[in-house]
Each structure stands twice: as C-alpha cells, then as structure tokens.
Amino acid sequence: MFVVDLTFDCYQDTTLEKAEQAINRLVNALRFNGQIIGDEFPTVLKDGFFITRVMCPLEDSLHPLHHSPFVKHAIEQLQQAGLLAPKVKVIGQDIHANGADQCQAPSCYILYTTYVHTCSPLYCGDDFQPVPLYNIPAIANGDYKALIKWQEDWQACDQIQINGATRCEFAALEEITSLSSDLSRRGLDLSKRIRYLTEKPVYYYLYRVGGESLEAEKQRKCPNCGGNWALSEPWFGLFDFKCDSCQLVSNISWDFQ
C-alpha cells in the first residue's frame, strides 16, 4: 500500500466546519470505492490549506479513471465549501502494509479477512494478494460499501473471539464459523454477486476453531454439500479445505495447528 497526501486549497473564505464536512464526504466516498484503505484519516490545517493523509492500494489508486459517481459528486461538492479538488502527492510505499494484486485477469477470487487486516477483503486466487475493489464492477449502488461494511462486522467478531474476555465471544465465533449465520449469509450473498459480475469463481472463507482432535479435523466434510474437501497441501499455506462445487474454503482448527 502507498501513503498519499491530499492537499485541499481554499479559493474563497470558508469555515472549518464546512471544510471538514466536505473533506470527510470525499474521504468516505473514496473509502467505499476501495481507492483508500482504513478508517482513520488525519487532517491538518497548515498555512491556509488542508492536508489529509490516506493509504491507497496502489500508486495510481486515486486516478480519476477509478472514481465512482459518489466520488465525482463529492469532488464537485468541495466547491460549495470553498475548496479546490485535492492535489495528490504519493509519499511512498508503506513497508509494513500488504501489497496489492496486479493480475490482469485473476482465475478466481477469495473473500477473506481477519481482525488485523486493513486491506481489501477480496483476494486474487492466483497470488493471494488483496484485489483493489475498484478493479471489479461496483457491487451495489455504484460502489463497494456493502462489502466494506461486511468486512467491518467480520473483523469486529474476530476481535471479540480472539480477546475471549466476555460471553459474547461465543456469539461472535458463531457468526464467522457457521455457514448459516447472518454474517455468513451476507458474505455468501456478496460472493454470489461478485461471481455474477466478474464471471469468476469466488470462494468464501469459513473460520475454524475448536474440534475434537487433529485426526477428526482432517476428516471434516464440506458443511454445505457433505462432500470431501480436504486438500493434500494447504492452498496458499492457509486453506486446508476447498470445495469447488460450493466455493467454500476453511482451515484445520487453529487449536491443532
């Protein structure tokens, strides 16, 4: 990922409140379009202009060719707050962050995330790099907000079950492990939508923890069709199970790894 500064010049008198609202509107539109990553975007006022620091999947993520209708509208709305369209300055690549997929035509995708990931929840099935969302057709209402909100909820459940400090741990765990949970149903619907839009397989990840033994884990069947889905070698060193018919992936319980 790349660290990028957006500089907003004032071309007429404005107020801090108007400028803040206009900048936030644009930042949210960019975020829900997959052009910027994360949920914290510090903004400073310096010498009469505003600077907002963001993270982008690729160096050219903020190119106008990637803008959604919401991003274009938010840029137009800047003028009402007395601001010009932002100047984009790429600071450099973040050495601690994930890279991004640059395959021209991935053979398939994987819908996968964890509480520590800030990148796209859609991964390339060829190199297991996160796919910038703007590289696939908009999922609903012109952007990817539904997918990003699903990711936020999945990560929240993952964080709760990892912490293991309250009784809600079990409800959170059910959401990310059960094929019939509300969260999984949302994720499966999103996978189906992406599959339709891209005409590519989209595998949905089911988290796995608990279980009786390592041997019992290896004998697990696909929770949807009941078929064999154990792999001889883990896919990308992570997924021990893969059902091509149901397009599901999972892991041997973390309790036995």
Image (spheres, grey):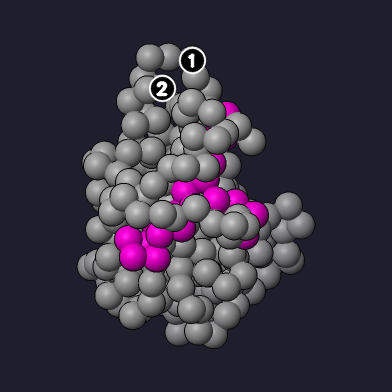
Q: Position of residue 171 (x, y in %)?
A: 33, 25
Residue pointed to by mark 2? 169
Element on which disc 1 rests: loop
Sort mark 1 into few (<14), some (14-19) or many (20+) by Cα contacts within 10 Å. Answer: few
**Extreme right residue here?**
95
Is 246 part of what is drawn in magenta?
yes
Q: Quadrant of residue 28?
A: bottom left
Tell me which residue sits at (49%, 34%) in the image.
216
* Residue 115 visible in the shown view: no
- In the rendered view, would you say 45 is above or below 127? above
Tell me which residue sits at (40%, 59%) in the image.
243
The quadrant the C terminus occupies is top right
**Extreme top residue here?**
166
Disc number at residue 165? Answer: 1
Which residue occupies the foreground of this view, 71 or 34? 34
The quadrant the N terminus occupies is bottom right
Sort mark 2 into few (<14), some (14-19) or many (20+) by Cα contacts within 10 Å. Answer: some
* Residue 235 visible in the shown view: yes
User: Magenta region: which residues?
Assistant: 236-255
Q: For the residue marked with disc 2, what is the amino acid?
A: Glu
Tell me which residue sits at (64%, 74%) in the image.
59
Which residue occupies the foreground of this view, 164 or 9? 164
In this rendering, position of residue 189 left or right of residue 99: left
Counting the numbered discs, the total is 2
In this rendering, position of residue 144 left or right of residue 52: left
Q: Rounded to the nearest whole Å, what is the CA distance between mark 1 and mark 2? A: 7 Å
Which residue occupies the foreground of this view, 2 or 188? 188
Tell me which residue sits at (44%, 55%) in the image.
229
